[in-house]
Image (tube, helix red, strand yellow):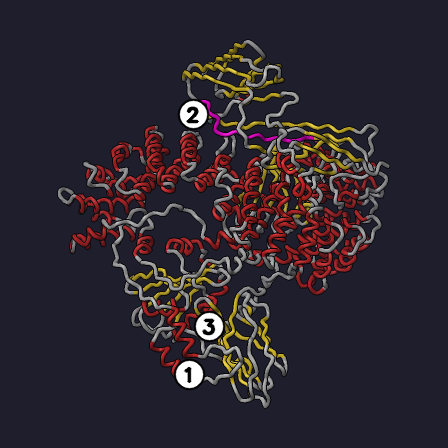
Amino acid sequence: MTDSKYFTTTKKGEIFELKSELNNDKKEKKKEAVKKVIASMTVGKDVSALFPDVVNCMQTDNLELKKLVYLYLMNYAKSQPDMAIMAVNTFVKDCEDPNPLIRALAVRTMGCIRVDKITEYLCEPLRKCLKDEDPYVRKTAAVCVAKLYDISSGLVEDQGFLDQLKELLSDSNPMVVANAVAALSEINESSPTGQPLVELNTSTINKLLTALNECTEWGQVFILDSLSNYNPKDDREAQSICERITPRLAHANAAVVLSAVKVLMKMMEILAADTEFCGGLSKKLAPPLVTLLSSEPEVQYVALRNINLIVQKKPDILKHEMKVFFVKYNDPIYVKLEKLDIMIRLASQANIAQVLSELKEYATEVDVDFVRKAVRAIGRCAIKVEPSAERCVSTLLDLIQTKVNYVVQEAIVVIKDIFRKYPNKYESIISTLCENLDTLDEPEARASMVWIIGEYAERIDNADELLDSFLEGFPDENAQVQLQLLTAVVKLFLKRPAHTQALVQHVLSLATQDSDNPDLRDRGFIYWRLLSTDPAAAKEVVLADKPLISEETDLLEPTLLDELICHISSLASVYHKPPTAFVEGRSAGIRKTLPAAKPGVEEPVPEATVIPSQESLIGDLLSMDIGSTIPQAPVVQPITNVDLLGGDLDILLTGPTPDLSGGAQPTTTGLLGDIFMSTTPVKFNPPKTCWLPAEKGKGLELCGTFSRRAGQMAMELTITNKAMQSMSGFAIQFNKNSFGISPAQPLNVGAVPPGQSLEYRLLLNTSGPIQRMDPLTTLQVAIKNNVDVFYYACQIPIQILFTEDGSLDKRVFLTTWRDIPSANEVQYTLNDIKGTADMISNKMTQSNVFTIAKRNVEGQDMLYQSLKLTNNIWVLLELKLTPGATSATLSLKSRSVEVAPFIFQAYDSILKV
Amino acid sequence: MSSSAIYILDVKGKVLISRNYRGDIDLGVIEKFMPLLMEKEEEGLLTPILQTSDCTFAYIKTNNLYIVSTTKKNANIALVFVFLHKIVQVMTEYFKELEEESIRDNFVVIYELLDELLDFGYPQTTDSKILQEYITQEGHKLEIQPRIPVAVTNAVSWRSEGIKYRKNEVFLDVIESVNLLANANGNVLRSEIVGAIKMRVYLSGMPELRLGLNDKVLFESTGRGKSKSVELEDVKFHQCVRLSRFEIDRTISFIPPDGEFELMSYRLNTHVKPLIWIESVIERHAHSRVEYMIKAKSQFKRRSTANNVEIVIPVPHDADSPKFKTTIGSLKYAPEQNAITWTIKSFPGGKEFLMRAHFGLPSVECEDTEGKPPIHVKFEIPYFTTSGIQVQHCYLELLKLQ
């Protein structure tokens, strides 16, 4: 007899009938009735009216019946919170049952009932179960702590469950350890402060690594995922973690393999890349990644999306494995498309012949989307691997000959890009392209074709006729095509003015009079005026050289890539978006970044950065649509101040270099320094403020500020002894802070005689422990001398954290600006602005805020600026200045928008000088 | 990490059974699943992960059933998919066939299983052998309450204690498949051997097994570099194998699960000469007929013989009235697979056989174009592996024979 009989019930009075059966004295009858209730629940009938009757069956020694009643409770307790309380007693009793199966069942179910009143009663049984003698109960209780945290985080913290959970990390049973780790990771991720509540340290890491060898495959995933959040303290620790994790790459479970890859990728970031160890590790990563491609198609898909990231981060790992990404005829379409993407990324001169012959094969397949992408891929190969361009073009021509409509259209779109990349090389094929004019019906292909005709108008004899034929249906065309047509006709006119005047007038009137698309009208008017006032200038503007198109079109922005590497095998790695983009609220967790390489491995920071020439960015900003023409703007030679000079003066004028013997030198140069500072634009450092007044420091007065010179951060201190006797034995210590700032050297100050003061420059680095502070820039300092230990807190001016390599490439700037969601944009009004845009730009450059480009829009100056914080947070800014006005609008975009107020503060203080 | 809920749907998207683990997403959200799936399929953008404003669906399809997991967080999606496939495996081992009917027939056990497989979205015990010890279909017949098998929380989570056999036996099979890609000129573009070692273990107690292969790395490290050995490019082991031990000295040591399982799989990228080479000439006369001429040639030693050779040749799906001619073996047309299967019971080395087939084609051409599926060849050669891998020894230590 099967369970399906429970689904068939008499329709009439069903609930009533069940009610009486539930209250039957016979155990068997009762159980049958409960099964019927569950069956009804399964098919979606509302059986909540039976709540009290079902709960009555809860006290039973029949395990199967108990499980069913518990299941019912989980489903309906929320809708009947008052009655659910009836079940509490049984739960509490079951948590003490001699059978561990029942104890675990009770604590597991209780955690799933999200009713406040029940939760209160859960604490005591949970506490006992966490210490249960049976590991099965302990492992269930560990997960229950995470459940409770989800319902009431305060309760978990108040009742000390976090500490109990931490103790379970040292449990003798590996499964208990694994579940405790899973629960802790979950709690850490949803912590309201964004700061992990429980930090992993070396000894817990060792315990986890031991448990890794013994727990189930799932437990291994929990442990590996939590290891990926740990930042080892030095190379040796990172290396030993790698060594102990590498065997996991041979696990049959794909999730274990991918999580192990995640940890290894992160650790490799810390280790020097050129070492033998790292090289060996890279070699070990390739085979397991390849084998993931023989798993189930869904797992393959996840693996391929991740491989896409890994290939961007470390192209070498898979560079010899091109062939494994060739598609199989029975791959699902989503796998095929992903494989194509990776093939293009791996394409190089060495393997291009193979890749092309594959792609050509794909272009004759049946699936339209796949074919299109394959054709596009051929074009991308041509642009990426220059020596192959010719072969790619001839392949594309072959494909055009097939006359398959969508193949032709796709080919024309990519050929346009090839023309742009290699001007004056392949124009001989234009006539073949023109033959297919009539078959093009997609806007992108039409626009591309029109662009080609306009660009090469002088070589196409009947260009005027061709364009004229397009103009007939002008009002019905897609906006993209209309814009291209307008530009193409103007280009034609400038190149062959003889017989095309009528044509150009026609298109200009179509664009300016008949269209209600403002972009089109504006462009029409610009051309019209240019042509009517100064045709020579028009020629220079319209027929100017175009900026080169880049080889890699869809690379992820580097900070995003680093963040995604930390999320390998998770949803974020499949979406290629940070978790904040799709996870709501606090559960989005802490933003993860790759640990910075240790100093010494770091590349040397350039001393002075030249502002990049501007015309290409303007070009990009204007040419959102393909092939529009760009004015050749005169290159503005930026005035750069040599940072070194500024720094030297600064040192000379604001204070003497610290005397290691401890001899105190009185300060004298403040005034002179001020005068000098205002004439030479040197880097701005905030003035010293009093951090520790003498009355609080038992006679020790401490004033100070922060500075950054040539990449070196320092705390500038003035130590004044206002006490009666000499002070000595100075030492300084910083608390954990948001940016990991810590002293790079001991406080080497000798004795300070009474009434004297002393200047000291304490060098800082950012390798200290990190803990998020509120406000973010707070730094708590302890200073010690022979008298006592004193504590004070100061604010770090954020500009000292701006690194020297904070200048973004224009293109990256542009894509990043677009990629950051508008929710992450903050605006601010700067008041009391003095000086021109260039002066402001110079001032900001001194503080490592780099101007990427400058534009003038409707009389307003726009400055595009970028900066990078020491913890690799990028901040992008747009400064809108109206000449003559004293206020300016500053728009900021960053993935970590919480830094915004401090950046604004920095702008205010830097520009005020 | 973490699934919020697991659903099993029928092919139309109706929920057959579901279990809510976290309660952070309304169970009714599943109503959106099917429409979204259809929409994406139409756009040609179907992926196994579907996103809505409320949650993310991750699903697999098996036997006309959808197994769906929902999540609101940045879940470990690789784990979710591996787990979904595991659910199918466990239920198949429980009910022989996972289908609509078996779900209705066993809903009570399925609820129990779902409760044990996953807790708060975290996979727990997923070994069906162990689960069967305390979650039984005949649960109500047991007078004694079931206890948790030690294996659930043991380091050895895949084998129960106290297994007893009168006759202790171990069977071991090495099965290899060659994936080979050749272009139209007959040049091999890519060849890869994917092999697996399957075991059937009927041993008492907690036996310790050690397996020796002619592994190149091992041979070189032990100074036997000259003997015939195989370089295993990538090896994947069943969870019972001690991975760290293998990493250190390449020893494959393990306590096996009871019964049948796959001990390891491996992959080699060596170029192999195809053992049976197929040449095909296909002449397609549109609107009237299509003709096949298939030549199969065995390229292995004359004294070996391939058994149960099966050559599957795809044909157009609108083909009709098949006619065959061959010198050996039998032919069968399977219209439901759009293929003909040529079976040869025994195929000696160094031979060549020929087959001709003829199909009629309808005069009206079908509109959807078809892909170009390859011809498949399946066969067995006893005591022979393409890669040359050999199991050299299998040491066995029976502990705790009570």
Task: Give the Cα separation between the discs numbered 1 and 2.
Answer: 90 Å
Vertical arrangement, residue B28 with respect to residue A589, above or below: above
Residue A441 position within the rendered picture, expressed as x and y whole percent measured from the top left: 32, 36
**Residue A824 can be seen in this image:** no
Name the residue carrying label 2: B367
* Nearer to us in this view, A421 or A530: A421
- Checking the image for residue A59, the label placed there is none
Residue depth check, mark 3 versus mark 1: number of the one nearer the observer: 1
Type of residue at label 1? Thr
Part of the protein shown in magenta: B183-198
- Do the numbered discs 3 and 2 sit on residues whose CB atoms are within 8 Å? no
Chain for mark 3? A
Looking at the rendered structure, which numbered label has been put on residue A707? Answer: 3
The amino acid sitting under disc 2 is Glu
Chain letter for mark 2: B
- In the displayed structure image, the side of residue B196 where residue A457 appears, left or right: left
Q: Residue B194: within the magenta?
A: yes
Res. A461 image quadrant: top left
